[in-house]
Amino acid sequence: MILPTPAITTGPWAAAAMIAAVVLLSTTGEVLTAAAMKSIGDLDDIRAQSGMKGAIKAVVTCPLFFAGVSFLALAFFSLLFALNHLSLSLVAPASASLTLVTNAIAGKIFLKENVDKRRWASAVFVCIGVYLLAH
Amino acid sequence: MAHHRLSPHQWMILGLVAVCAPLGDTCLSRGMTHLPAITLGHPVTLVAAVFTPWIAVGIALLIGFFASYLTALSWADLTFVLPATAFGNVIVAFLSKFWLHESISWQRWTGIILITMGVGFVAQGPAVTERPTPSNNPQAAEAIEEEPVR
């Protein structure tokens, strides 16, 4: 018996929605984690002053960090769900490359990072490069 | 802005982020392919898989990746760290060519060139966005100076 491949049973809109879910959840997790680490401060300085235990305590007592990790976990499970319905050669490069661009947008809007022309060019170059490398 | 340039120690942390993630994934992949098929009906086999050498090394590398990634995010922008650490993909491609003797298609060579150019672009700029502080914001500095002493 020949089983139908995932690509046949999943329409283009459903595939796009699955990849979008992976990208959005991953971007939310990355932005929350980055915001948490910025609020904690330079971990190298904390480790120099309070040792490794102090650095670990500073991270694990930050609620924003757990929010970020929770979204990263959701992104991971949504990736597994997408892989169950779509081929790896589509999901992996598409989600990895699109996340770079959405992170640049989210970094500018939510983290108020200075995303200048150099960083935009870098994000686009790496996005296309990762897609070509992983495809 | 000299203080926004990274020190050799900080570049080493970014290097760990770039190398540990793809190598950890590779170790996990290699370890899992050598195991018999695991089903949800036998979850104990999944726990036992954690203690096999390749998967244990893969998990250790991914823990190293996450610790280095968090450290990097504490002193650099997210929009700097992500493109800068994408160079790990290039390292894996070269490892696959020269260590595993796999062929690299022209699309992959193009991808390697584009990632290298992207990393080069972002590495030339500052690692962190400059925030207004009393030392570099004259108005804020004046406000502090004018504040009456109690």
Image (cartoon, coloured by chain):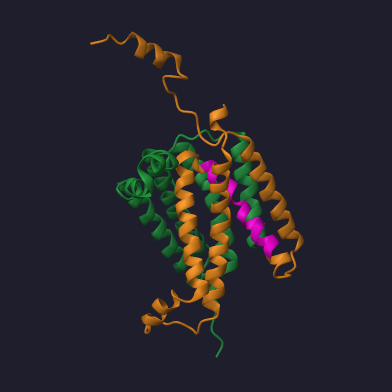
Chain colours: A green, B orange
User: Which residue is the extreme one toward the bottom?
Assistant: A1
| Nearer the observer, B112 or A40 | A40
Q: How many numbered marks, from 0 up?
A: 0
B37 vs B90, left or right, is left
Residue B85 falls within the magenta-colored stretch = yes
Residue A108 falls within the magenta-colored stretch = no
B116 vs A26, left or right, is right
Does residue B56 sit above or below B141 in this rendering? below
| Nearer the observer, B37 or B58 | B58
Tell me which residue sits at (57%, 74%) in the image.
B30
Magenta extent = B79-95
Tell me which residue sits at (54%, 65%) in the image.
B25
Percent coordinates x, y for residue B123 in the rendering: 62, 40
Percent coordinates x, y for residue A62 in the rendering: 31, 46
Can residue B109 be seen from the camera position used here?
yes
| Nearer the observer, B5 or B117 | B5
